[in-house]
Image (cartoon, helix red, strand yellow):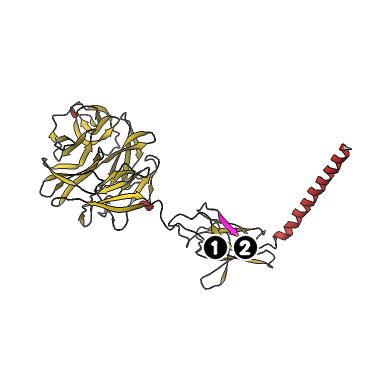
């Protein structure tokens, strides 16, 4: 009895499969009469577009990125029909034939664009309206606000700002040769001023140690100070210092020279105990450098940018003195004078700078992989009210926001402090 029931069941299933196959064969004819659009894809976008046959709309659930130009996109349409005829309505209401194409020069304005799909047999049609959603706010951009004004004396001729122990310091010299330091403990909102006993310091060489500052003058003399900013001339050093760099791995690092050429030196003690860590690669440009230290994963490395006639270069220095080429000339970074190196939004950034033609850049180049690959990050380009700027100091705050302190543009020195936070 059980065997008979199983045989009947198998027979029923076989009949069902046979009927399903017949239904599928019938759908071949049906597909030639179905005008509906099944899929819309747009070249360069990974967005999934929803086809609503009831409302006659094609739209995206997740908004497209801010700045997406929906007036010039290359869509392709695919239907349930074998080969539906696709038309779009032009600006005067006429229907124009549109064919899916690999030609990327074929662009359509998808702003509320009407699309008509006609079945292969020409008997049925369906009209859709494309309604694309685009972010109205650039969530990847900074929100800029002026947080302070620098109370400088006279016309600033040279400057540099740094952060040490949670305090912001701006060192500068004016055109009369007087030098000062401004200090702020509230992220640049208010500043106090002190006169420095220094003659002709080159503030572009300023670097922080674990407990103070090192700077050189135009003649190459080295001065050192604690957080009291009382600079004292340093005795003869074991190597000729060319450019103080940064503190990394418990050591203070500097580019020096000896009879063999340029070398990398470091000390965990006084400057008089600088130790030669290695020879710099011949491609390393030791002039007009900008340096900083930033995290690379769970470790820290030093970054050194410099410009050459062929473009900008970037080098990484690890805590053991290893020197790594990250960006070579003719790479993604341009040749700039006095740009700012910074860390913001978990990225390494190169901001502003003066270009070879004398104009000031407002561009923001960023790298999310520790300086290996770079992009011209238009989301964070300096806004028009800041404009192009060079010689600005970019300071990272404990909350991850960024301060831009001072700098100059075509109109001269800017005694302002701007704070950038993510929107």
Counting from the top left corner in percent of width and height, residue 378 is at 38, 53
Asked if one can make out residue 362 in the rendered structure from this viewpoint, the answer is: no
- Camera-near label (2 vs 1) is 2
Counting from the top left corner in percent of width and height, residue 314 is at 32, 40
Q: Is residue 83 magenta?
A: no
Quarter of the image where the N terminus is located: top right
Left or right of 199 in this view: 126:
right
Counting from the top left corner in percent of width and height, residue 210 is at 24, 33
Labelled disc at residue 54: 2
User: How far separated are the C-alphas under marks 2 and 1?
Assistant: 14 Å
Mark closest to the chain's N terminus, 2 or 1:
2
Q: Is residue 23 above or below residue 342?
A: below
Residue 387, quarter of the rendered image: bottom left
Residue at 53 percent of width and 58 percent of height? 103
Q: Is residue 411 above or below residue 404?
A: below
Counting from the top left corner in percent of width and height, residue 114 is at 56, 66
Left or right of 29 in this view: 422:
left
Assess disc 1: are there few (<14), some (14-19) or many (≥20) residues with their C-alpha within 10 Å of its C-alpha: many
Q: Which residues are magenta?
A: 42-51
Q: Which secondary structure, mark 1?
A: strand
Front position in the image: 149 or 353 = 149
Asked if one can make out residue 141 in the rendered structure from this viewpoint, the answer is: yes
Q: Main secondary structure of the magenta part?
A: loop
Residue at 33 percent of width and 35 percent of height? 301
Assess disc 2: are there few (<14), some (14-19) or many (≥20) residues with their C-alpha within 10 Å of its C-alpha: few
Residue matched to label 1 = 130
Residue at 73 percent of width and 60 percent of height? 29
């Amino acid at each position: 009895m059980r065997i008979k029931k199983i045989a009947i069941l198998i027979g029923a299933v076989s009949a069902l499969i046979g009927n399903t196959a017949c239904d599928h064969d019938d759908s071949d004819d049906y597909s030639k009469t179905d005008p509906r659009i099944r899929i819309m894809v747009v070249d360069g976008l990974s967005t999934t577009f929803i086809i609503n046959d009831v409302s006659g709309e094609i739209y995206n659930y997740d908004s497209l990125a801010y700045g997406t130009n929906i007036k010039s996109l290359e869509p392709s349409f695919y239907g349930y029909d074998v080969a539906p005829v696709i038309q779009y309505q032009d600006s005067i209401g006429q229907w124009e034939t549109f064919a899916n194409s690999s030609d990327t020069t074929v662009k359509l304005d998808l702003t509320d664009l009407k699309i008509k799909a006609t079945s292969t047999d020409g008997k049925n049609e369906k009209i859709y309206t494309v309604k694309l959603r685009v972010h109205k706010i650039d969530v990847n951009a900074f929100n800029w606000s002026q947080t302070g004004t620098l109370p400088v004396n006279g016309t600033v001729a040279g400057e540099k700002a740094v952060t040490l122990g949670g305090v912001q310091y701006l060192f500068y010299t004016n055109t009369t040769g007087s030098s000062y330091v401004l200090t702020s403990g509230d992220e640049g909102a208010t500043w106090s001023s002190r006169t420095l006993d220094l003659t002709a310091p080159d503030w572009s060489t300023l670097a922080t140690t674990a407990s103070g500052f090192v700077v050189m003058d135009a003649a190459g003399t080295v001065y050192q100070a604690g957080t009291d900013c009382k600079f004292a001339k340093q005795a003869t050093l074991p190597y000729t210092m060319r450019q103080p760099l940064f503190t990394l791995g418990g050591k203070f690092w500097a580019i020096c020279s000896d009879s063999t050429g340029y070398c990398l030196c470091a000390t965990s003690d006084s400057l008089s105990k600088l130790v030669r860590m290695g020879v710099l690669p011949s491609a390393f440009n030791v002039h007009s450098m900008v340096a900083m230290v930033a995290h690379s994963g769970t470790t820290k490395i030093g970054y050194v940018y410099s410009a050459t006639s062929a473009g900008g270069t970037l080098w990484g220095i690890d805590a053991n003195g290893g020197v790594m080429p990250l960006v070579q000339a003719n790479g993604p970074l341009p040749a700039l004078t006095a740009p700012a190196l910074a860390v913001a939004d978990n990225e390494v950034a190169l901001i502003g700078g003066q270009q070879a033609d004398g104009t000031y850049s407002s561009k923001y180049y960023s790298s999310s992989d520790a300086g290996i690959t770079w992009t011209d990050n238009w989301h964070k380009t300096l806004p028009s009210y800041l404009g192009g700027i060079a010689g600005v100091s970019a300071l990272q705050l404990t909350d991850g926001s960024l301060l831009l302190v001072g700098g100059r543009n075509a109109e001269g020195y800017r005694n302002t402090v701007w704070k950038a936070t993510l929107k």
